[in-house]
Amino acid sequence: MAATYTSRPGDADVRWLPVDLRAPDQIATALAAVRPSAVINVAVRPADWATTADGAARLAAATRGHGCRLVHVSSDAVFSGRDVHYDEAALPDPVTPYGAAKAAAETAVRALTPSAVIARTSLIIGDGDSKHETFVRDLATGRRDGELFVDDIRCPIHADDLAAALVEIAEGDHAGTVHLPGPDAVSRYELGVLLTRRDGLDPALLRPAHRPDSPRDIRLDGTHTQKELTTRLRGAHKFLTR
């Protein structure tokens, strides 16, 4: 097993290789060195089309050339929220630049590697080090000023559950689009309350607010996908309970 990095290796005890999806030579070098049977693409830079969209296309073309399986991780950001509930057959209708980049990546992956898996997921929560967890902790400790929306709703998933599901998918014979959300739909504010309670902080310091533009209620429906997996995906109310 091998992993890649752009700025510094991670902590896992695996073989680390430098790969920037904006650099085709680095992709080719890594694939030639490892000769993987499957590649899981979790790379993203929200404000960088070259990595999120074009990079995914480069990787798809490269994995096809090497004959290895591709699992491309996408996001619920490809949806606007107008339909609220989105199953695996739902078509993207992004309303943000990041969502547009992820939708373009999905299109490229489908076109270049029809046997690939596109795995859409939601907010990814870890054990304290994710971007959202850091933001909530800063709000609850007064290090940052801000609000959490009560009308921005997602289906958070724990990083461990997502990783296990992606490995299972990579080792299986799945193809097409799968959905990997947690089963609990919660608002950003409700998620913040759960996080502060887990961390022993006071949720009363969190300020609820409404989105200044329009509500975004995006609930991935992974019912079909979950039937095909042995990995169980926990909801936020379960994995954030102390």
Image (cartoon, rainbow, N blue to C red):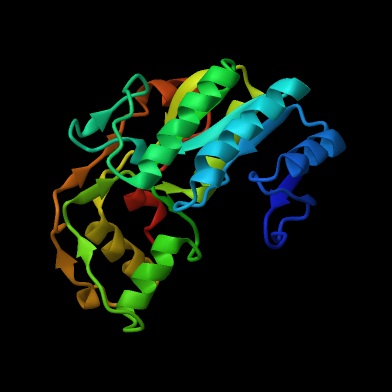
Question: Quadrant location of residue 241?
Answer: bottom left
Q: Can residue 155 be seen in this view?
A: yes
Vertical comparison of 187 with 131: above or below: above
Question: Quadrant location of residue 37?
Answer: top right
Q: State the count of labels.
A: 0
* Residue at the extreme bottom: 142
- For the point 28% across and 28% down, the residue is 86
Vertical comparison of 110 with 147: above or below: above
Residue 119: % across, % down: 48, 31
As rendered, which of 102 and 140 lies closer to the eye?
102
Left or right: 175 as drawn, with respect to 183: right
As rendered, which of 222 and 31 lies closer to the eye?
31
Quadrant in which the N terminus is drawn: top right
Q: Is residue 164 visible?
A: no
Quadrant in which the C terminus is drawn: bottom left
Residue 227: % across, % down: 43, 21
Vertical comparison of 73 with 226: above or below: below
* Residue at the extreme right: 33
Left or right: 18 as drawn, with respect to 129: right
- For the point 72% across and 47% down, the residue is 3
- For the point 27% across and 41% down, the residue is 95
Residue 188: % across, % down: 26, 57
Left or right: 43 as drawn, with respect to 33: left
As rendered, which of 178 and 50 lies closer to the eye?
50
- For the point 49% across and 57% down, the residue is 126
Question: Quadrant location of residue 218?
Answer: top left
Residue 21: % across, % down: 64, 44
As rendered, which of 164 and 124 lies closer to the eye?
124
Left or right: 119 as drawn, with respect to 223: right
